[in-house]
Amino acid sequence: MSRRVAFYTLGCKLNFSETSSIGRIFQQAGYETTPFNSAADVYVINTCSVTENADRKCRKVVKEALNHSPNAYIVVVGCYAQLKPREISEIPGVDMVLGAAEKFNIIEHINDLTKQPKVIIHNAPIADTNQFVPAFSIGDRTRTFLKVQDGCDYSCTFCTIPLARGASRSGTIADIVKQAKEIAASGVREIVLTGVNIGDFGIRNGSREDRFFDLVKALDTVEGIDRFRISSIEPNLLSDEIIEYVAQSERFVPHFHIPLQSGSNKVLGLMRRRYRRELYASRVAKIKELMPDCCIGVDVIVGFPGETREDFLDTYNFLNDLAISYLHVFTYSERENTIASQMQGAVPGAQRGERSKMLHILSEKKRRAFYQTQLDKEGEVLFEGDVKDGYMHGFSRNYVKVRAPYDPLLVNELVPVKFSKITDNGDVEATEIPALLTH
């Protein structure tokens, strides 16, 4: 009987793509992948350092794994494993911790799964992590996350990602196009491009060899993929030529996720962001000029050290006036070894919570207003296989979340629909779904 391995992923889309690739490494070594909530010989937990309470979350997942299989071998990888290996090694039940450079050699490290008296740690200095390892998620979604870039050369004062993932580096355009063709051959209809700082794509061995725009143009020629979606791109790297190209592309969809972090130029300076709010506003205006129905998502941090109430209201009013579609709101939390953690002017926790709540409410208002502009229009929805209360869901090209009565024949199909109304839970209900040829 083959050994069984189960995975749990915390954090971002990049982590999901890497977990999936590590899963394929195990399969090639003869392991059978099993759901996390079932018995396994090995549990691999891919961690994140960006979200709060990394230690508590990791402990909880380790405990859950051991509930399913008390004698299982527990391996912890990912950003938190690179930053805090000793801390993780003190979690009861952990057998091995692998840093950023070691996680893709996991099979060699775990060897025969013999538990040792002491936790094994393989964690090279992050400066030694300079290889780009390709990754993509496949097999569990109608959309695939394709890693095109890793690491970051920026030095935002709040961020531990450069410490956890190293310097910016990428694969070649030829290799990434090859992976996209492999994904297309598997039947996946949509690829989401992901990375730490994907607009900085093109650095190999410390020097720039390509541009993200050149990658976009190359991927646009890949047959068999109906949609490419850009997951997140810094405003200073989202050039007019990229916006103009996406506007006329049949495959790249009208949806951008653009981190802002603050609408106050003072706070942006404290964060060491590489733009000011005026540039951000000009990017949004350019997108909406060329693609009026484009969906624009925004990352924003509240409660950064030195953020006064006036600074926060600057951010709130700036976002309120922008033609954006939704927010991802992060409440600032101190991170060791970051400049921000040593800054003066810490915002009390209650105020951070209050500001977060205000922006969450604004996000819902923005999403509903965006969806309202789409009613009575027609779009193409890629339906997914999940069923809830008799309904299935999917996304339009411009990221409208649509629900329809479950029909197995619609799964992984691009279906023309008419957006009819906004439901009580905030999705859009689709009507006039034509019968598929397969019916």
Image (spheres, rainbow, N blue to C red):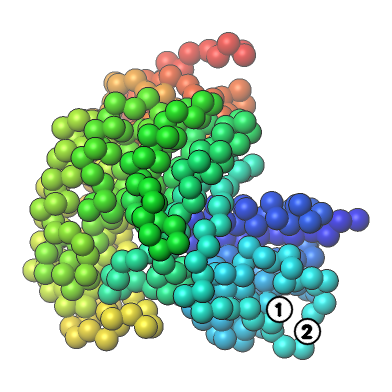
Locate the N terminus by quadrant.
bottom right
Q: From this viewpoint, is residue 321 visible?
A: yes
Helix, strand or loop under label 1: loop
Picture quadrant where residue 253 is located: top left
In the displayed structure image, the side of residue 408 where residue 277 appears, left or right: left
Picture quadrant where residue 345 is located: bottom left
Q: What's the residue at 51%, 74% (across, down)?
A: 128
Q: Are marks 1 and 2 in contact (CB under 8 Å)?
A: yes
Q: Which residue is mark 2?
A: 116
Residue 344 at x, y percent in the picture: 19, 86
Locate the C terminus by quadrant.
top right
In the displayed structure image, the side of residue 254 where residue 69 appears, left or right: right
Residue 76 at x, y percent in the picture: 62, 72
Q: What's the residue at 33%, 51% (across, down)?
A: 199
Dot label at residue 95: 1
Q: From this viewpoint, is residue 391 visible?
A: no
Mark 1 residue type:
Asp
Residue 113 at x, y percent in the picture: 80, 72
In the displayed structure image, the side of residue 92 where residue 101 appears, left or right: left
